[in-house]
């Protein structure tokens, strides 16, 4: 009897709820119906529980887009590098350049012509041929603003690496010419020391001209077609991106897994939970704090990504009292780098003395870093005219970055030490976008920030972060030293690597003496994987192709 | 002051006998409300006496002692920065109560002002104000608060302001409807007939008679405001480090939940208890002051 | 009735228009340059300036507003600055995810809340009543993000009973047809997946549903008590416990109106609370979509997203009002 009553009541309620759901459902019927379901998804779902090998990668955020030339962020490249390939590649764990879609290349003695011999028999996922025409097609799209497939907002990395677009004064690439179907020739307007290294960067991956023309750039950005080890299948925004094995991949025997899924799990610890419970196989953005947990779990493995970054404490060298190098040096003495690295990077990083990471050539290892010494700091402050310290603001970034796991907590720890030398700081933070904008404009006093390398060239760190030409852009310390500027400019056009190396080492010495920033750490971002995952080698640049990764 | 006013009015009208004293009697007998009072007094006490209760500082910790479990030295354990969680929870009470009280007072002042205007003058003023209230109430409040904080920049003060703003219509509508019903009462029509000034009628007669529901809603409103402030803090849009705001503490300690659950349990429990306290008092007040508001 | 409905629908227009103005002005008052946010820390100032031009951010505000209004009236919600995709097509799955979660938690809230309320009233002042009302009191005071965290920690991380994040298992993803995964799995006849989808819904559903559940329980109890004092029920009751059915039916009918109101009000709260719940449980819903968009300064997404949520809320309230009128003839259609 009672049971009947309950179920009657229940069904009434259900009907009501469904009615409500129906109302809101009709609201969005028009919006949901985009009707372009990838057919492969059905098959994948049907056969999922049986045999094929799946690799599920958990990560913190979704990709903004999947046409690599249009994006600038690692979350996009993590996916696109599996779908589209570049002419040349970086070696597995460093920034030496090795053949990619191009088998070999020759450089003319004046450094103005590069001739690439392309790999033959390579096909795009849509069946069209990869050849010299395809290469030319892509470069024409990127360099020519009037090309119909050019992005109205431009292509940021192209602009940055090759000095603007066709017709601009500083544009590097004069022309790209098809010599024969498997040979392509680049003619430059002026020599560019890191040209080959630039071509290995993820944004310059070759897209299928056929797919681009048929879909148009907007659609292509959601459905990329390349020559890579995996083919695009489906994208559920803010949730998963699914790729499947490209059976016709030119590098025989690869990829090892049949299906590759990128899953968004925003919170680091939640992602680890998912890994522990077997929902995912591989994750990035492991909290340094959890490294021990991972190590002690026999089902998991800890993987470190080699460092190509710097996290630093910067000073606004235009503002008082930080215009005084003594004050800056005093603070440098009061930053306990080893303790910070131990506490917040949990040993997954090394204390830094230079803005340049040691994995990059040109690193000056002769520099001897200042030890943590509060007395020395106080003394320097007194010499600078602040025996009782001063008050200032300390800007901390609101989001974790690869180079700094938790800006606010690190700022809090530094704040405690600075208090002891009489420097009272107020920690300021704001939205990430605002933070970038304001530090760029120079509104800050002391601040935390960092940099992730793009192409493994010292120029990408020293010139970008500390040259006077980049004040208002990426030189947020507003450090303006003519001597450093001359050295960096000279290094840009120097021909040999030895010569450049010498110049960069000199520059680092001056920078160390002037202390526009206190380099804190080069972090080795931690990843974790199921013990079953083998052959995964993270690349210092932050993303890599997963073709060799296998599951035991 | 208000009490005196009410009583004179009430006597002249012979409507009810001293509602405030009656209310107090009822309230004292309401066990739930008494418990609520005790909880809130407890939190007010620890907030005021924070420096005497604990020897630790809320913003200083020992890094080597981070994420230590509760012990005799650290009753609630330590957090990721080696700071005493108990100390932070105690100081956090200051922030939450402060935001709760002042945001509600802000909403009440502004809401009452517009509610009086709309209710008393009617016509296009009423039209305009009521439509604005409708529109504001059409947004899920936390979204509106997030948007406002995004404009003002994240900080505890701005969170307070945002919470104040989003709750204005609640009080505005309440006062408006009270005014509409009181306006037709004889003593008000009489006052108007003898040529009493509008402002005098509003503030001397109508407002005091609207106090009861405002107080009830306000008390419950403090509870809501505390949760809203904590939510903003949790999303990183409220209090900023190293302020020991409870919501912010939850967000910061969240990643250590498996290793150091105490860093998440205690701040959350404090939010819940404070909110519970205000809800209990609010319910009790409603039963005592305004039986009609009961469902 | 028809004219009442038409009038109510017409009254929506100024409200919606006002909402669009408020949203638009709030969005444009937010500091932070969307161009810089999108281009990132590596952008050159020149690139930023060019990008602003492309986005039309250099046009006068009123002109931007009218363009925005024209777009939404033609069903075009704009293009996301961040993903460069059409919001109209992008927002669908997010909305579906949120609606599914909201409906699920509302069913949970109504089912538990109504039954607990009725039984509490029936057994007034019993232990059951006290415990229910204590739980309801605590529920009303619950910070849902804390509840969510505790649930996640306890049931997902410690006990490993339920999945901690997401809508489905990525090893065996649901093939989206309607984007409502419960419906999709039923359509596909994948009962194992249905189970999986429901297990993903439980934790966030409870977190989101707790407050409305508590409120509904309290309201049901008090309206039920009132009903039970009526002569009709007293007679029924006098006949003994066997008449529980009569009371149940009768009380439910009477409690319906206040519950309906609460559903209308709470849906708004749920849609707002979704921001917090979705953040905690990695739910790919509209709350997180908007929250991320605020961080990214993705103007079009923020304005369209908030507007869509607010519109749903207004429409639900309208439907609730119309339902009132339909159910209870005593309510006059003014």
Image (cartoon, coloured by chain):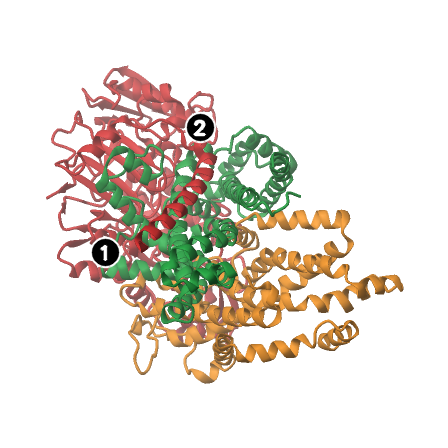
Chain colours: A red, B orange, C green
Q: Position of residue B2 (x, y in %)?
A: 72, 74
Q: Is residue A428 visible?
A: no
Give the vertical position of A472 relative to A87 (above or below): below
Please name the residue shown 22% across and 23% down the image: A118
C-alpha gap between disc 2 and disc 1: 48 Å
In this view, the residue in front, C57 or C267, is C267
Indicate left or right for B182 with A218 as reference. Answer: right
- Dots 2, 1 in contact, CB < 8 A: no
Secondary structure of the residue carrying numbered label 2: loop
Which chain letter matches label 2? A
Q: Quadrant of the N terminus of chain A?
A: bottom left
In the image, farthest residue toward the bottom = B52
- From this view, report whether residue B295 is shown above or below residue A56: below
Q: Which mark is residue A151?
A: 2
In the picture shown, does residue C94 fall above or below B40? above
| Residue furthest to the right | B194
Asked if C66 appears above or below B224 in the picture, the reply is above
Q: Chain of mark 1?
A: C
Viewer can see residue A299: yes
x, y percent for residue B216:
59, 67
Counting the numbered discs, the total is 2
Q: Work out which quarter of the rendered image holds the C terminus of chain A and state it.
A: top left
Q: Name the front one of labels 2 and 1.
A: 1
Callout 1 crowding tier (Cα within 10 Å): few <14, some 14–19, many ≥20 = few
Residue at 25% across, 20% down: A130
* Horizontal arrangement in the rendering, residue A483 relative to residue B161 (left or right): left
The answer to which of A15 and A451 lies nearer the viewer is: A15
Residue B214 placement: quadrant: bottom right
Question: Percent from the top left, x then y, of residue B170?
Answer: 61, 57
Which mark is drawn over residue C161?
Answer: 1
């Amino acid at each position: 009897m009672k049971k009947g009553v309950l179920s009657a009541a229940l069904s009434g309620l259900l009907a009501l709820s469904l009615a409500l759901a129906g109302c809101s459902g009709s609201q969005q019927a028009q919006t949901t119906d985009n009707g372009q379901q990838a057919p492969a998804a059905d098959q994948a779902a049907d056969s999922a529980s049986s045999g094929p090998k799946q690799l599920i990668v958990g990560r913190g955020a979704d990709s903004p887009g999947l046409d690599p030339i249009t994006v600038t962020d690692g979350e996009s490249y993590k996916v696109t590098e599996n779908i589209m390939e570049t002419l040349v590649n970086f070696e597995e764990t460093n920034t030496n350049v090795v053949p990619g879609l191009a088998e070999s290349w020759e450089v003319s003695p004046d450094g103005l012509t590069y001739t690439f011999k392309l790999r033959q028999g390579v096909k795009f996922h849509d069946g069209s041929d990869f050849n010299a025409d395809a290469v030319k097609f892509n470069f024409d799209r990127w360099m020519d603003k009037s090309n119909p497939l050019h992005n109205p907002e431009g292509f940021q990395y192209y602009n940055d690496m090759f000095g603007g677009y066709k017709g601009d004064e500083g544009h590097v690439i004069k022309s790209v010419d098809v010599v024969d179907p498997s040979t392509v020739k680049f003619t430059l307007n002026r020599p560019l020391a890191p040209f080959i290294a630039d071509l290995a960067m993820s944004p310059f991956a070759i897209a299928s001209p056929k797919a681009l023309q048929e879909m148009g750039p907007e659609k292509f950005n959601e459905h990329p077609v390349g020559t890579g080890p995996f083919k695009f299948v489906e994208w559920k925004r803010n949730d998963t991106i699914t790729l499947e094995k490209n059976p016709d991949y030119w590098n025989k025997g690869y990829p090892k897994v049949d299906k590759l899924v990128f899953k968004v799990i925003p919170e680091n610890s939640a992602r680890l939970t998912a890994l522990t419970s077997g929902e995912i196989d591989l994750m990035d953005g492991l909290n340094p704090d959890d490294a021990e947990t991972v190590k002690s779990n026999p089902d998991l493995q800890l993987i470190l990504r080699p460092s190509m970054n710097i996290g630093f404490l910067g000073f606004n060298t235009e503002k008082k009292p930080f215009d005084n190098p003594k004050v800056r040096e005093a603070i440098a003495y009061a930053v306990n780098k080893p303790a910070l690295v131990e506490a917040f990077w949990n040993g997954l990083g090394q204390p830094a003395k230079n803005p340049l990471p040691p994995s990059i050539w040109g690193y000056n290892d002769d520099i001897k870093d200042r030890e943590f010494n509060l007395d020395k700091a106080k003394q320097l402050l007194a010499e600078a005219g602040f025996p009782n310290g001063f008050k200032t603001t300390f800007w901390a970034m609101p989001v974790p970055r690869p180079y700094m796991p938790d800006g606010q907590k690190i700022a809090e720890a530094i704040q405690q030490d600075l208090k002891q030398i009489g420097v009272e700081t107020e920690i300021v933070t704001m939205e990430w976008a605002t933070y970038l904008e304001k530090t760029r404009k120079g509104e800050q006093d002391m601040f935390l920030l960092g940099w992730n390398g793009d192409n493994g060239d010292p120029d990408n760190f020293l010139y970008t972060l500390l040259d006077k030409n980049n004040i208002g852009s990426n030189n947020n310390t507003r450090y303006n030293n003519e001597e450093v500027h001359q050295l960096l400019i000279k290094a840009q056009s120097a021909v040999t690597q030895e010569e450049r190396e010498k110049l960069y080492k000199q520059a680092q010495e001056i920078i160390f003496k002037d202390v526009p920033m206190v380099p804190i750490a080069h972090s080795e971002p931690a990843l974790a994987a199921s013990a079953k995952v083998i052959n995964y080698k993270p690349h210092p640049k932050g993303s890599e192709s997963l073709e060799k990764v296998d599951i035991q | 002051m208000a009490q005196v006013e009410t009583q004179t009015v009430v006597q002249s009208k012979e409507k009810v006998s001293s509602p405030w004293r009656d209310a107090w009697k009822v309230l004292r007998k309401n066990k739930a409300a008494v418990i609520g009072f005790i909880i809130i007094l407890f939190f007010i006490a620890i907030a005021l006496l924070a420096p005497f209760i604990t020897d630790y500082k809320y913003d200083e910790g020992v890094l080597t002692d981070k994420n230590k479990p509760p012990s005799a030295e650290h009753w609630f354990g330590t957090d990721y920065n080696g700071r005493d969680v108990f100390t932070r929870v105690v100081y956090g009470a200051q922030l939450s109560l402060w935001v709760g009280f002042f945001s509600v007072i802000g909403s009440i002042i502004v809401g009452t002002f517009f509610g009086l205007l709309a209710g008393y003058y009617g016509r296009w003023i009423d039209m305009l104000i009521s439509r604005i209230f409708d529109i504001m109430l059409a947004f899920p409040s936390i979204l509106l608060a997030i948007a406002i904080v995004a404009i003002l920049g994240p900080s505890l003060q701005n969170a307070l302001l945002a919470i104040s703003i989003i709750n204005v219509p609640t009080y505005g509508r309440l006062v408006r409807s009270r005014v509409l019903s009181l306006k037709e009462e004889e003593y008000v029509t009489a006052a108007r007939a003898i040529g009493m000034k509008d402002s005098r009628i509003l503030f001397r007669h109508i407002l005091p008679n609207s106090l009861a529901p405002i107080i009830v809603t306000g008390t419950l409103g403090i509870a809501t405001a505390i949760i809203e402030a904590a939510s903003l803090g949790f999303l990183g849009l409220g209090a900023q480090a190293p302020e020991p705001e409870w919501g912010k503490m939850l967000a910061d300690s969240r990643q250590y939940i498996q290793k150091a659950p105490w860093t998440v349990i205690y701040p959350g429990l404090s939010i819940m208890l404070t909110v519970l306290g205000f809800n209990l008092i609010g319910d009790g007040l409603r039963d005592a002051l305004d039986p009609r508001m009961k469902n | 009735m028809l004219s009442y409905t038409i009038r109510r629908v017409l009254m929506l227009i100024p409200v919606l228009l006002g909402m669009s103005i408020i949203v638009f002005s709030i969005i444009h008052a937010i500091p932070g340059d969307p161009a810089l946010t999108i281009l990132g820390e590596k952008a050159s100032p020149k690139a930023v300036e060019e990008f602003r031009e492309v986005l039309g951010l250099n046009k006068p505000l009123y002109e931007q507003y009218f363009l925005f209004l024209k777009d939404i009236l033609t069903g075009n919600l704009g293009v996301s600055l961040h993903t460069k995709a059409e919001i109209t097509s992008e927002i669908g799955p997010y909305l579906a995810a949120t609606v599914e979660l909201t409906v699920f938690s509302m069913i949970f809230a109504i089912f538990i809340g109504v039954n607990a309320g009725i039984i509490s009233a029936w057994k007034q002042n019993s232990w059951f009543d006290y415990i229910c009302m204590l739980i309801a009191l605590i529920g009303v005071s619950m910070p849902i993000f804390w509840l969510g965290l505790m649930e996640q920690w306890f049931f997902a991380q410690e006990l490993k009973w339920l999945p901690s994040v997401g809508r489905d298992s990525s090893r065996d993803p649901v093939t989206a047809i309607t984007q409502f995964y419960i419906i999709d799995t039923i359509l596909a006849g994948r009962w194992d997946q249905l189970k999986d989808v429901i297990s993903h819904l439980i934790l966030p559903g409870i977190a989101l549903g707790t407050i409305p559940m508590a409120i509904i329980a309290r309201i049901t109890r008090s309206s039920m008590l009132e009903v039970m004092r009526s002569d009709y029920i007293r007679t029924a009751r006098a006949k003994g416990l066997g008449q529980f059915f009569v009371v149940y039916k009768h009380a439910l009918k009477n409690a319906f109106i206040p519950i309906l109101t609460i559903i209308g009000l709470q849906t708004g709260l749920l849609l707002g609370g979704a921001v917090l719940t979705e953040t905690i449980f990695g739910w790919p819903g509209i709350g997180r979509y908007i929250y991320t968009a605020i961080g990214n300064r993705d103007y079009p997404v923020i304005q369209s997203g908030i507007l869509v949520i607010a519109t749903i809320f207004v429409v639900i309230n309208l439907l609730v009002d119309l339902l009132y009128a339909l159910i209870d003839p005593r309510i006059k259609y003014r």
